């Protein structure tokens, strides 16, 4: 099996977090990712940090870096100025998202002079002719979706607006991704759809994130992790489950895996090595 790789990081908010980010990039850099992306915080709270981290990664590592950009809490002019700053820094790949509302706001409320949704943002970015544009997709229904088909319709709007690929929210069953991919193709979507993979570093944290984003947790997985927590073997289970999921995706024709690292390289690195997608430096000198 072979596949291209990419990774998502988030901008650090402390010195210790900065060290963790750079350690993560060093640990995963040998896998030669096609690109890495850097997120915004909810409500655009890390906008300036994201910009600084994106510029630094590009200059210091030579990695192809993509910057997240959202519609939250900014006018159209302000948002496009941020995009222009990225272009001036040599960053021409943007992950364009609607974004999560600021904490405590509840439902997303567009800025009075801002983009109303992600297709509007994508169309404006595409009009510049400057950016490669990646967007989000939801193989499990988005919490705000009226039904399953709504997520397909939104993805088609984003691709038609000028996006060249999509990355999915994480999911726990390969068939969830395959069903979504097949429905997207049936709807006339021919852009690549990259599966988003979340190695489970914290079972309690993963459950909280899954609840917020609508990812469905299979009963079997919940029982397995509840048992593993009691037995102190959650890391082994996490590696095994993630490796199995990725293997099924690769066997089903997936040629690119996108990992949500949470700025911790250990599980992602171990899964990539278990899949044989990159050499393990620790074993290279073993006779």
Image (cartoon, rainbow, N blue to C red):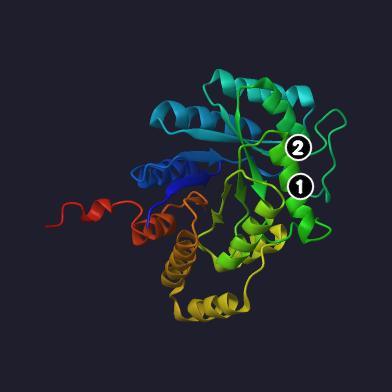
Comparing 204 with 191, the one in front is 191
Q: Is residue 15 left or right of residue 67?
A: left
Q: Pick out the residue farthest to the right.
A: 112
**Crowd tier of the residue under label 1, counting other residues whose Cα lies within 10 Å: few below 14, some 14–19, many 20 or above:** some
User: Residue 32's image quarter?
Assistant: top left
Q: CA distance from mark 2 to mark 1?
A: 8 Å
Residue 250, which numbered label? Answer: none
Q: Is residue 258 above or below residue 22?
A: below
- Element type at marker 1? helix
Q: Is residue 141 above or below residue 58?
A: below
Comparing 156 with 130, the one in front is 156
Q: Is residue 245 above or below residue 160?
A: below
**What residue is disc 1 on?**
154
Where does residue 85 sit, x and y in percent of width and height? 61, 21
* Residue at 72% over, 37% down: 160
**Pointer 2 or 1: first along the chain:** 2
Where does residue 42 sit, x and y in percent of width and height? 70, 45
Q: Are marks 2 and 1 in contact (CB under 8 Å)?
A: yes
């Amino acid at each position: 099996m072979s596949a291209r790789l990419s990774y998502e990081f988030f901008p650090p908010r402390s010195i210790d977090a900065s060290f963790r980010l750079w350690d993560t990039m060093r640990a995963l850099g040998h896998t030669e990712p096609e690109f890495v992306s850097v997120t915004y915080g909810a409500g655009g709270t890390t906008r300036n940090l994201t910009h600084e981290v994106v510029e630094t990664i590009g200059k210091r590592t030579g990695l192809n870096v993509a910057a997240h950009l959202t519609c939250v809490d900014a006018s159209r002019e302000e948002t496009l100025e941020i995009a222009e700053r990225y272009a001036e820094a040599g960053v021409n790949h943007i992950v364009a998202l609607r974004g999560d509302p600021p904490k405590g706001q509840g439902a997303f409320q567009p800025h009075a002079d801002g983009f109303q949704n992600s297709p509007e943002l994508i169309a404006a970015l595409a009009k510049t002719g400057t950016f490669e544009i990646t967007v989000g997709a939801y193989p499990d229904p988005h919490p705000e979706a009226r039904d399953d088909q709504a997520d397909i319709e939104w993805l088609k709007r984003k691709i038609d607006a000028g996006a060249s690929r999509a990355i999915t929210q994480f999911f726990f069953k390969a068939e969830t991704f395959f069903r979504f991919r097949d429905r997207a193709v049936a709807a006339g979507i021919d852009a690549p759809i990259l599966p988003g993979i979340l190695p489970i570093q914290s079972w309690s944290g993963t459950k909280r994130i899954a609840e917020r984003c609508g990812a469905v947790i299979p009963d079997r997985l919940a029982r397995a992790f509840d048992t593993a927590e009691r037995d102190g073997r959650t890391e082994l289970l996490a590696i095994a489950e993630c490796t199995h999921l990725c293997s099924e995706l690769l066997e089903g024709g997936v040629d690119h895996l996108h990992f949500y690292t949470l700025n911790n390289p250990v599980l992602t690195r171990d899964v990539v090595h278990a899949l044989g997608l990159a050499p393990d430096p620790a074993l290279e000198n073993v006779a």
